[in-house]
Structures are given as structure tokens and as C-alpha cells.
Image (spheres, grey):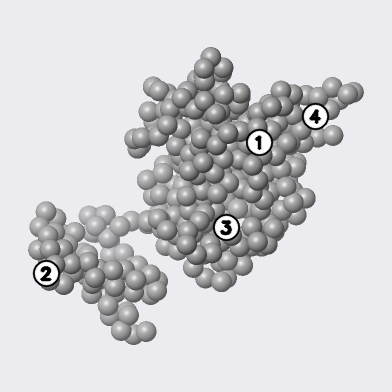
Amino acid sequence: MQVKVGLIGDLHFTDKSVGKFIDYFEVCKDVAEKISQMIISENLTHLFLAGDLVGVSNGDNTMRTNAARLWLIQMFAQWSQLLNGNLYCLRGNHDGGAHTCDFDILMGAMLIKHVDYVDCGAFRIHMIDYGDDNRTLDLSDDSKVHVAFMHSHLTVENKTNFIPFQGGTELSTMRNLKGCEIVACGHIHNPSLGYISTSIEGEDVHLIYLGCPTRASSNDRWDKTQVLVLETNEVNGVTNAMQKVITFNLPPKDDLLRETIAEAKIEGIAPEEDVTNVEDLERILNELSNFQIGGMGSYKEQLERYAGLNKEAANLAMRYIENAEKELCKV
């Protein structure tokens, strides 16, 4: 009997406009199709997702349109069918909130499973959600290779300096993870491209950042992420446990981005106006109207007053706001 498990990083699917992306939703569709192909080519029996399924900006955890949500449900249904229902997902920092989000919908439709741990052949995969780093794990079965699958910011001193932001928890101090041979992390978008080794109270442990295949920020410049594959085979009554890291190749990032207005001006190019989502725009304008710096003046007056360090940027922002207000008046 063969059991073959894949672990992959944050997906951050959304049909909303994201940064400089020409069409971020198309990027999401491309990544989703690559995952489908990987499930088939690698003959996976289980797939574990690191969370942050939907949304890029803070508080964003639902698709904008019903058409996009239908695509999301259909894609997860396809994966679940290919995996005979063995599709599991952590709850990341984008997968909750005061209202029902798309993670909850996928859970309610039984397209993803969310449990404490899963025994997959020779491996026990412990699922540790965002904010639950210190949970006590069931490490009692010595016959298993224990894997902590987490949505967390873990670091290893002098070895994870490539992460472009500070903070995090030193892995060697995580006593509840003692006994885990592998710690696979989502939340950190940067792929580690291999294991980073340390120890917890004298026991070796190997950390891997899986990476974000959608490269949810325009500044995310890597050209590949990775999938951790754990395989168990039984031959003549002997159980063999194997692991490998496979490369998840991505298209050149520059092919997916558009120039900003300021960059286009330098090149002497007149770019097309951004297509603006009216609902998002109305929310932003309402927030600006309510946010009175010092309690005086409209946001336009405040922009003129407080943006003195960069008049060109202020002028571009004012143009955008004025165009946006005109568009809203047409609705």
C-alpha cells in the first residue's frame, strides 16, 4: 500500500485587485491548475494546505464575486475528488473573522478537513493553526515520524536572516515540538528552498518554509516555491518512509506586473487608467472622509497639507481621488 502526502504553502486566492498585478486572479487560476497537475503527476493520496486560502490584505477572507466563489468551490471539489476526500487545511490568519468566510464555506461543504493530526502511513502530520503554536501534541506513537505542519513565524538563529521582516519565535525554544523531526511552515511567504536544521533540547529538527506560490505581494520576487512530499511504501511486509522536496516552478514575475503611473511617466508612456472596483472605492472614500487628521479639514485638504514631502505623489493621489469620485457619481 502506498501513501503519498503533499504539503504546500499559503495560496492567498482572491479575485480582487492586488498591487501591480495585471490580473492576480489569473495568477491564482494558474497556480490552482499546477496543483491539480501535481496531484495527478505525483500520485498524491493526501494534500495539506498551509492556510490563508483566500485574501491578501488584512481582513480580506472572501471572494468578491459569486462567479469567483463558484470557481473556488469547483476547484476544491476537484482536488477533493482526486484525493478521495483527503484534503486538509490549516486555519491561517486570513481564515477567520467575525463573519462567515470562504474557509468556513469550504469546511461546511466538507471539501476541506480541519483536525488535530492525521496518520498517513509512517508519518503523523500535526496540524497547528495560526496562534496555536504552543499546543501540546500527541507524540506518544514512537513508530511514527512526527511532522509539525504550522501557520507560524518560526526562525532559526543566523539561518533565517533572509526573511524581510523581524520578530518570530526561535524554533529551538519550542519545547512542545520536541520529538518532531520536521516542521513545515506556512505564513512565511519566502521559500527556504530546502531544510534549515537546529535542535530542541538536544534532538534534531528540520524547518522548511514552503513559500507562497501566488507571490501575493508585488515585492515577492522568487521564481519557485516548494512542496514537501512524504511517502510510505510497504514491500514484503517492510515499511519504507521517504521524503523529498519538489520544486514548484513559477512564471517570471515581471511578466505579471504592470507599471505604476509614476514609472510610466519616467518612460514617457501614458498608461491606461486603473479599472476600479466601485464597492471597494466607496468604502475607501468613506474611510478617508471619516479620518480627520487633527480633527480639521476634508481628506483632500489634509492631503494637500500633509503630503509636502512628495508633491508629485500627492498630485497623483489627488487625481486618482477626483477620478474615483466621478466614477461613483455615475453609479
- The image shows residue 190 at horizontal and vertical percentages of 45, 38
Q: Secondary structure at mark 1?
A: strand
Which one is in front in this view, the residue at disc 1 or the one at disc 4?
1
Label 1 to label 3, Cα distance in Å? 20 Å
Query: Viewer-proximal residue, 274 or 122?
Result: 122
Residue 199 located left or right of residue 311:
right
Which one is in front in this view, the residue at disc 3 or the one at disc 4?
3
Q: Secondary structure at mark 2?
A: loop
Q: Quadrant of residue 28?
A: bottom right
Q: Earlier in the sequence, mark 1 or mark 3?
A: 3
Residue type beneath disc 4:
Asn
Q: Is residue 237 shown above or below 285?
A: above
- The image shows residue 233 at horizontal and vertical percentages of 80, 29
Q: Looking at the image, do the residues carrying marks 2 and 4 touch, with CB atoms under 8 Å apart? A: no
Disc 3 designates what residue?
103
Which residue occupies 51% across, 41% down? 132
Label 3 to label 2, Cα distance in Å? 41 Å
Q: Earlier in the sequence, mark 2 or mark 1?
A: 1
10 Å crowding of disc 3: few (<14), some (14-19), many (20+) = many
Disc 4 designates what residue?
233
10 Å crowding of disc 1: few (<14), some (14-19), many (20+) = many
Q: Earlier in the sequence, mark 3 or mark 4?
A: 3
Which one is in front in this view, the residue at disc 2 or the one at disc 4?
2
Label 2 to label 4, Cα distance in Å? 70 Å
Label 2 to label 1, Cα distance in Å? 56 Å
Residue 78 visible, this orientation? yes
Disc 1 designates what residue?
125
Disc 2 designates what residue?
296
Label 3 to label 4, Cα distance in Å? 33 Å
In which quadrant is the C terminus drawn?
A: bottom left
Residue type beneath disc 3:
Phe
Q: Secondary structure at mark 4?
A: strand
